């Protein structure tokens, strides 16, 4: 069965061009011309990949991505305007798998699509991680406490996932930076402390638990299973 790709793009000429090229490559293609329609179609499921333009009427592409990531881990490639650095950074931070800058060559886009699809299928569905009443589902990108959903940004989610996967093992700031932000992160290491604070504000404070422990001079750790 052909992999189905959703193109969310308001410029009809570009959307049509992409549709023809992708169909020529053997993909099945659907199109949406605005953000809200695109989000509804993407959430309805069945797509192997979403090509998502950032500059869209109604709901912009980053907002579509943010809402989509609350419920779905489907691979997303952002189509960004030339030099829109902020879009790329916030897009990747919100969970885009890749981005490509307009104008792009169709060969480059096809290569990115193949890579994103390969990465998607290579990943086996990971187990839900729990700590007490807290549950993090890596496949669906959801976090709940006692069934109540907690909204986390993509980096907050990755940070929590990393700590849960390494429970009882102290994670240094450098290790967390590398695992969550990547090798090429050029900012301050105190970004880890800032995000730990965000997680505590969203989980420890409202639910009255002590989830993340600070290990003075070393880093952070989640201990035990929360029972
Ligand atoms: Ca556009």
Image (cartoon, grey):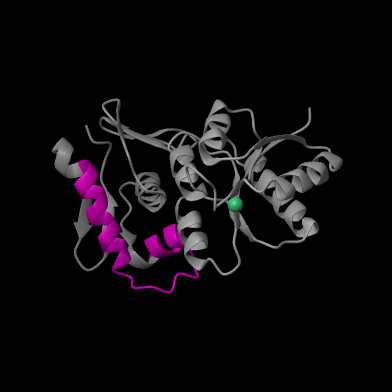
**Which of the pair 6/73 is nearer the observer?**
6
Q: Quadrant of the N terminus?
A: top right
Q: Is residue 202 magenta?
A: yes
Badge count? 0
Please say if 202 is above or below 142.
below
In the rendered structure, the answer to whether residue 20 lies left or right of residue 217 reads right
Question: At 57% across and 33% down in the image, what residue appears?
Answer: 42
Residue 86 vertical position relative to residue 205 in the rendered view, above or below:
below
Residue 119 position in % (x across, y down): 65, 47
Residue 209 appears anywhere in the view: no
Percent x, y for residue 136?
A: 38, 36
| Residue at screen point 54% across, 48% down | 56
Q: In the image shown, does 133 or 142 lie closer to the viewer?
A: 142
- Residue 200 lies left or right of residue 135; in this view the side is left
The question of residue 70 being in magenta is answered with: no
Q: Position of residue 10 (x, y in %)?
A: 62, 45
Q: Which x, y percent locates residue 203?
A: 23, 42
Q: Is 97 positioned to the left or the right of 103 in the image?
A: left
User: Is residue 132 placed above or below 186 in the rendered structure?
Assistant: above
Identify the image quadrant of the C terminus: top left
Q: Quadrant of residue 75?
A: top right
Q: Nearer the viewer, residue 163 or 151?
A: 151
Magenta: main secondary structure equals helix
What is the quadrant of residue 137 in the picture?
top left
| Front residue (pair 92, 171) | 92
Tell which residue pokes out farthest to the right in this image: 24
Visible in this render: residue 183?
Answer: yes
Q: Which residues are magenta?
A: 175-203
């Amino acid at each position: 069965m052909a992999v189905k790709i959703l193109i969310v793009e308001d410029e009809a000429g570009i959307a049509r061009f992409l549709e023809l090229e992708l169909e020529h490559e053997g993909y099945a293609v659907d199109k949406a011309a605005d953000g809200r329609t695109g989000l509804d179609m993407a959430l309805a499921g069945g797509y192997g990949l979403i090509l998502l333009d950032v500059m869209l009427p109604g709901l912009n592409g980053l907002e579509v991505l943010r809402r989509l990531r609350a419920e779905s881990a489907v691979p997303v490639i952002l189509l960004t305007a030339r030099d829109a650095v902020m879009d790329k950074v916030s897009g990747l931070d919100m969970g885009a798998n890749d981005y490509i800058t307009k104008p792009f060559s169709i060969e480059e886009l096809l290569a990115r699509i193949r890579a994103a699809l390969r990465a998607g299928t290579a990943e086996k569905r990971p187990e839900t991680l729990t700590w007490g009443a807290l549950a993090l589902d890596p496949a669906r990108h959801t976090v709940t406490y006692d069934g109540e959903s907690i909204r986390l940004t993509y980096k907050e989610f990755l940070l929590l996932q990393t700590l849960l996967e390494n429970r009882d093992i102290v994670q240094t700031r450098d290790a967390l930076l590398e695992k969550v932000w990547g090798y090429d992160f050029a900012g301050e290491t105190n970004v880890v402390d800032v995000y730990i604070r965000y997680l505590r504000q969203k989980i420890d404070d409202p639910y009255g638990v002590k989830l993340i422990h600070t290990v003075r001079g070393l880093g952070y750790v989640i201990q035990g299973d929360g029972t």
